[in-house]
Image (cartoon, coloured by chain):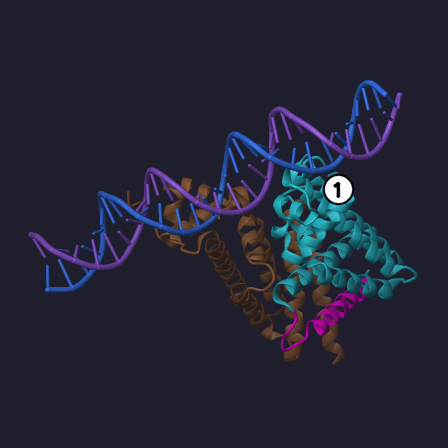
Chain colours: A brown, B cyan, C purple, D blue
Amino acid sequence: MKAGLNKEKIIEKAAELAEKNGLSGVSMKALADELGIKPPSLYKHFGGGLEELNKELMLYGWRLLDGEITKAVIGKAKDDAFIALCHAYRGFVMSHKGLYEAMQWYDMYQSEEHMQASGDAVEIMYRALGSYDMTEEQKVHTVRLVRSFLQGFSTIEVHIGNARRVPLDDSFDFALNTILGGIAGMQKDR
Amino acid sequence: MKAGLNKEKIIEKAAELAEKNGLSGVSMKALADELGIKPPSLYKHFGGGLEELNKELMLYGWRLLDGEITKAVIGKAKDDAFIALCHAYRGFVMSHKGLYEAMQWYDMYQSEEHMQASGDAVEIMYRALGSYDMTEEQKVHTVRLVRSFLQGFSTIEVHIGNARRVPLDDSFDFALNTILGGIAGMQKDR
DNA sequence: CTATAATAGCTAATTATATTAGCCAAAAGT
DNA sequence: ACTTTTGGCTAATATAATTAGCTATTATAG
């Protein structure tokens, strides 16, 4: 007994489970089995039960993603930073489908914690746009556009897979170029 | 007894439940209670149980959305059609948050039925872009961009609500203009 | 180093939901 | 009017989350 567990290790195992079986595969039972303990023991680490576990999983996922996109934009500016960030985001989702589920759908309809977690990613995007010549308000709009696109594209890609007549890679690049073109056009206007 | 139910009526009630309590609020128990019958009776209508119910709910939602965006683009072309479609999509999601959940997350990771259901909406978008001067491939890319943006924006709006320093309405319009600008720029290029 | 307290596991029991089996009355069709 | 199908029901089963209360291990205070 005394398996030497802690929140961190448990969350990591939960993330593994999410990758393997989707978020619905992360149950107290399955997780306990995986850890070699009994379900009630999990409550010693997560008093809030499954809900708390899901919340922690969400936070864990966003921390990982934040790290990835931060790394991606280091030393880059403008379009280079933008493109690198977008590719990093998409790549992260595709290699963490199950975790992304937890990141998205935790506590639908208002969760302060979810907002804060994804807020860090937004902050990174915002700073990556720092090198553009835009008003602050335009930056907010732009971040929202980019964030929406990334989330939508990633989600759809996770759903429908990648084999299509027109490759998704091409569509992704087309979209980034279109958005960049649109932004460039905007800047001329003002 | 013999409550005079059928699939259609049950799905409508399930949709109501989803709107009120989110998708997780749609259980066999809750639905049966709402309909004034016992849970096992639901299996006479949905032999596939909760899974089939969710699937039907998803299809129902997409049919509704297809109707809305079809209506929205009637008699419009180019930017007018594009803008009307986007507003219709966003409006639909905001007034059917619970149903949208069912539309999105049914059977994550590959569902032929989900692809077909959302495929109709894609088809409508595709036709709405018919009036633009683009190659077929560019249209596919564009539909994917727009679809991704709409889905991402809607989802995020559902999550974070609307009260922010910079209004979401403005961001939405900004995004549409940016995308339209990007498309216009593309067209000049080729 | 020992006594005590906190920790992290366990078993047993409770609750809730989904689902299956099998019964039966009402509706529909012949 | 008879028969079949339909759509309810009750009873029973299986599984997951959770709570209560027990206990051995670990950590800490004296």
User: Is residue B23 something that shows in the picture?
Assistant: yes
Q: Which quadrant holds residue A147?
A: bottom right
Which residue corresponds to mark 1?
Answer: B3
Chain of the residue displaying label 1? B
Disc 1 element: loop
Q: Amino acid at mark 1?
A: Ala
Q: Nearer the viewer, residue B143 or A55?
A: A55
Give the x, y percent position of residue B158: 65, 63
Give the x, y percent position of residue B154: 69, 62
User: Relative to residue B98, is residue B175 depicted above or below?
Assistant: below
Check if residue B165 falls in the magenta segment.
Answer: yes
> Which residue is pictured at 81% across the width and 53% down the height?
B66
The magenta span reads B162-187
> Which residue is pictured at 87% across the width and 56% down the height?
B130
> Which residue is pictured at 76% across the width and 63% down the height?
B91
Q: Main secondary structure of the magenta part?
A: helix
